[in-house]
Image: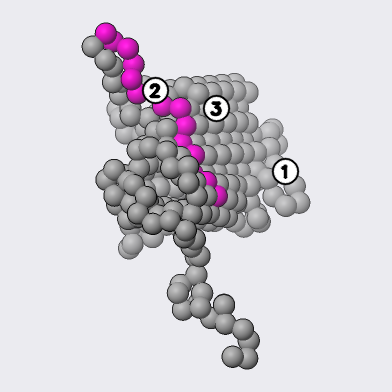
Amino acid sequence: MLQIEGKNNRLIFIFPNRTVDCLAAGNEEMKELLRQADLSIIGDDNSITMRFDTEENAGELLRSGGFMLIVKGNGNVVNLGSLIIRCSPILGMTGLKLIVGQLPGLGTGVSRTADNCRVEIGDRVVINGATVYLQENRSQVRIGDDSQLSWGVDVWCTDAHTITDLEGNVLNFAESIEIGRHVWIGRDVKVGKNVRIADNSIVGWGSIVTRRFDEPNVIIAGNPAKVIKRGINWDRKSIDKYLKSRTPQGE
């Protein structure tokens, strides 16, 4: 269900041949499509930009039930590339839930907002089941092109509550999460605040990532995650198809 409240909010769809201001007066065709989407923007001066290869792709995503976008706060920026989002109840694939500010279902007594946050997700990113959540003001999440997130994945740029020392000084500020280009996040991985995962890396199934990994082309795994193998890369194709693609024709 579409919910837009506040002033100076923008929702822009970018297609190869045109750019559409979805909230502009008179754009009834796009508004009818959006009414079928799970999308909420509550606050002022928020900017959401989404890229699609075709208008059919936009309709498939917004009607699929596998995409939720909630922005509650002011001055937030969300830029989404041409994503591949999968939703399958049989396998537990839930698509993408992207939430800035208010988590749904917390009740009327809980009201949380986040201001001046930024989310950047690149092109050709495959998401099978991930929740991306920002709650702290000015926090950021970036996911690079050609990455792949399995299902049961949490990317939380917040602890949701405050940790202090005995003098009351805050210890757990959330600043950013950076997932590089061509990174494969395995099933049931949890990525916490202030983490970096460098390009061409893999995060193993069920890992808990709580610190920066600046070295590219590594496998990290475990709780807490650590580097378990260096000098690797990965490909989306199955092993059989990958081997065939490397065999010269005629051999």
Residue matched to label 2 = 173
Crowd rating for badge 1 (residues with CA inside 10 Å; few <14, some 14–19, many 20+): few
Mark 2 vs 1: CB contact within 8 A: no
Can the viewer see residue 188 in this picture?
no
Q: Say what secondary structure mark 1 lies in.
A: strand
The residue lying toward the viewer, choosing from 63 and 247, is 247
Q: Which mark is residue 54?
A: none
Can the viewer see residue 235 in this picture?
yes
Residue matched to label 1 = 19
Dot in front, 2 or 3:
2
Q: Say what secondary structure mark 2 lies in.
A: loop
Coloured how? one colour
Residue matched to label 3 = 76
* Between discs 2 and 3, the one toward the N terminus: 3
Residue 68 vertical placement versus 16 (above, below) = above
Residue that appears at 42% across and 32% down: 194
C-alpha distance separating marks 2 and 1? 37 Å
C-alpha distance separating marks 1 and 3? 20 Å
Answer with the quarter of the image where residue 133 lies.
top left
Mark 1 vs 3: CB contact within 8 A: no
Answer with the quarter of the image where residue 55 lies.
bottom right
C-alpha distance separating marks 2 and 3? 18 Å
Residue that appears at 32% across and 34% down: 105
Q: Is residue 30 magenta?
A: no
Q: Which residues are magenta?
A: 167-181
Q: Position of residue 161 (x, y in %)?
A: 30, 24
